[in-house]
Structure formats: C-alpha cells, structure tokens
C-alpha cells in the first residue's frame, strides 16, 4: 500500500505563531459584527439619546472594564515573566471585575425597562448592543476561569503560554468593543 | 530586547492612565458640547485613540507583523534545509 510522505515539513511555523494569527483573524471577524451593530444605532435612532440614559452608570462601567483590562495585562505580563502566583491573582481580579460588570449591565437593564423597553427604538438598540457585549464578557469570564483552573497547580509556564495570552487578548477585545459602545449609547446627543 | 516585568507593568500603568484621562475627558465633553456634529467627531476620535492604545500596547498588535512576515517567508521559501535549521 502506498502512502504519501511529504518531502519535508516546514518547521518555520510555530504553533504559537499560528495560534496568534488565527486568534487575530477571529477577532477581526467578530469586530465586523460589532461594527454592523454600532452602525444600526444611527440608522434606527440617529444620534439622539433619551435623557433617562444613566451617563454616570455608563462611566462607571467603562472605568470598571478599563481596570479589568489593566489586571488582565498584568496577569499576562506576570505569567510571561514566570510570576505564576501574580498571574493567578490578576486573573482572579479580572474575573471579579468582569462579574461586577455583568451585574452593572443587569442594573442598567432593570432601569432601562422602565424608560425605554425593548419595544422602543432606542431600547432595541441598547438591549441588542449591551446584550451582545455582555455575552462576550461572560464568555471572557468563563475563558479566564478555565485558564485559571488550568494553571492553578502549575509553577512554570510550560505549554500554557497561549492559553493565558489568548484569554487575555479576548478580554482586551471585549474592552475595545466597549470603548465604542460607551459613547455610542451614553454620550451622543 | 525583552523588557523586565517592572518595565512592562510601567507601560501598562501609563496606558491605563491615558485611557482614564480620555474617558473622563469624553464624559465632560459630552456634557459641555451641544453641537451634535462636533460632539460626534470628538467622541469618534477619542474612541479611535483609546482603541489604538489597547490594541497596540495591551494586545501587542505589532507582534502580528512578525508572525505574518515569518509565515510569508515560510510560504515563499523552497529551501528545505533552511526550514530545518530552527528545529
């Protein structure tokens, strides 16, 4: 029986390179989804924002997410430099802030139902955008939790580098999406 | 050249400081400015700069070009000996 044997295997592509490139391609495709949703705000309600939109809550949520991005960054940096305990602490801090953010959006929805329910034009935009975003936050929290669980007993980097890096990159992507959602929903007039 | 952990964390603090300042600025600008077009333009520019800071410094976007050039080099290379060197 004949078997195809490749003449040579190209060893220039490390799995880390491939993983990073693949993740970036996925993030770009997901960003296009957010761009479409953000543009729908302008088609549906223009730039007007109802007066009952809680700008202070929006600012608070933004600061919380930015701080979680810093802790995620510190987790990745600590892990890359071999400070596994520091990385675990920062991962837990990021997860905690992510959960707080979800509760903050829950409170926002509770208030939004009173003033602009999903049946209204602005309500449709707000619930869709924040709903899709908070789903990304939840998957980020789950991924960070999985990574924490994976490295909980390790004392060295081993083969976990991309696990930490990929989860943290995903978290930063969620933050980038919010950087555009926040002014679109809360600050425009 | 690889940065030490302290140098890397310092970069993180500088970036988060810049992001915090811009976030507060856009909040205040939205309160102060009534011109819709001007407000839209200012908020868009601020959001783009904030996104760039996160993508460049937190997500290490610059790293991507290194991977792309390595992949490209590998794709166009027809020298099996060279490919085996790094192994």
Image (cartoon, coloured by chain):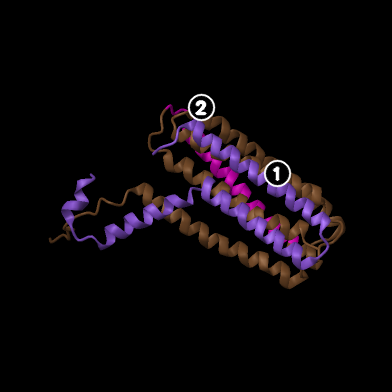
Chain colours: A brown, B purple
Instruction: Estimate the x, y position of residue A29 in percent, counting from the top left.
Output: 52, 62
In depth, the one of B51 and A124 nearer the eye is B51
Q: Identify residue for label 2.
A: A85
B67 inside magenta stretch? no
Element type where label 2 sits in the image: helix
In depth, the one of A9 and B76 nearer the eye is B76
What secondary structure is the stretch in magenta mostly built from?
helix
A150 inside magenta stretch? yes
Element type where label 1 sits in the image: helix
Dot label at residue B43: none
Depicted A111 relative to depicted A79: above or below: below
In depth, the one of A93 and B11 nearer the eye is B11
Q: Identify residue for label 1.
A: A63
The region drawn magenta spans: A126-155
Dots 2 and 1 on the same chain: yes
Residue shown at 49% from the left, 58% from the top? A26
- Quadrant position of residue A90: top right
Position of A141 with respect to A118 (left or right) is: left
The chain letter for the residue carrying disc 2 is A
**Quarter occupied by the N terminus of chain B:** top left
Instruction: Estimate the x, y position of residue B58 in percent, counting from the top left.
Output: 54, 45
Q: Can I make out residue A105 in this image?
A: no
| Mark 2 / mark 1, whichever is N-terminal | 1
Mark 2 or mark 1: which is in front?
1
Number of marks in the rendered image: 2
Q: Can I make out residue A185 in this image?
A: yes
């Amino acid at each position: 029986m004949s078997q195809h044997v490749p003449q040579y295997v190209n060893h220039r592509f490390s799995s880390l390179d491939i993983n990073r490139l693949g993740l970036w391609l996925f993030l770009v495709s997901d960003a296009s989804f957010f761009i479409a949703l953000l543009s729908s705000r302008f088609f549906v309600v223009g730039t007007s924002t109802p007066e009952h939109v809680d700008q202070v809550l929006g600012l608070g949520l933004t600061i919380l997410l930015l701080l979680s991005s810093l802790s995620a960054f510190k987790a990745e940096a600590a892990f890359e430099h071999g400070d596994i305990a520091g990385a675990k602490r920062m991962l837990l801090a990021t997860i905690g802030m992510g959960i707080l953010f979800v509760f903050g959006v829950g409170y926002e929805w509770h208030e939004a139902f009173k003033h602009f329910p999903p049946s209204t034009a602005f309500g449709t935009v707000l619930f869709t955008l924040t709903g899709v975003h908070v789903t990304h936050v939840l998957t980020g929290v789950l991924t960070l939790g999985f990574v924490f669980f994976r490295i909980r007993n390790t004392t060295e980097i081993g083969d976990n580098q991309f696990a930490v890096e990929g989860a943290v990159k995903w978290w930063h992507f969620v933050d980038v999406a919010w950087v555009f959602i926040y002014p679109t929903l809360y600050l425009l007039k | 050249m690889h940065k030490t952990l302290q140098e890397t964390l310092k970069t993180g603090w500088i970036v988060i400081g810049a992001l915090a300042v811009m976030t507060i600025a856009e909040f205040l600008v939205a309160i102060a400015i009534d011109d819709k077009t001007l407000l839209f333009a200012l908020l868009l520019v601020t959001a783009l700069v904030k996104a760039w800071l996160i993508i460049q410094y937190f997500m290490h976007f610059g790293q991507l070009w290194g991977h792309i050039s390595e992949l490209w080099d590998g794709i166009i290379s027809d020298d099996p000996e060279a490919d085996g060197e790094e192994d």
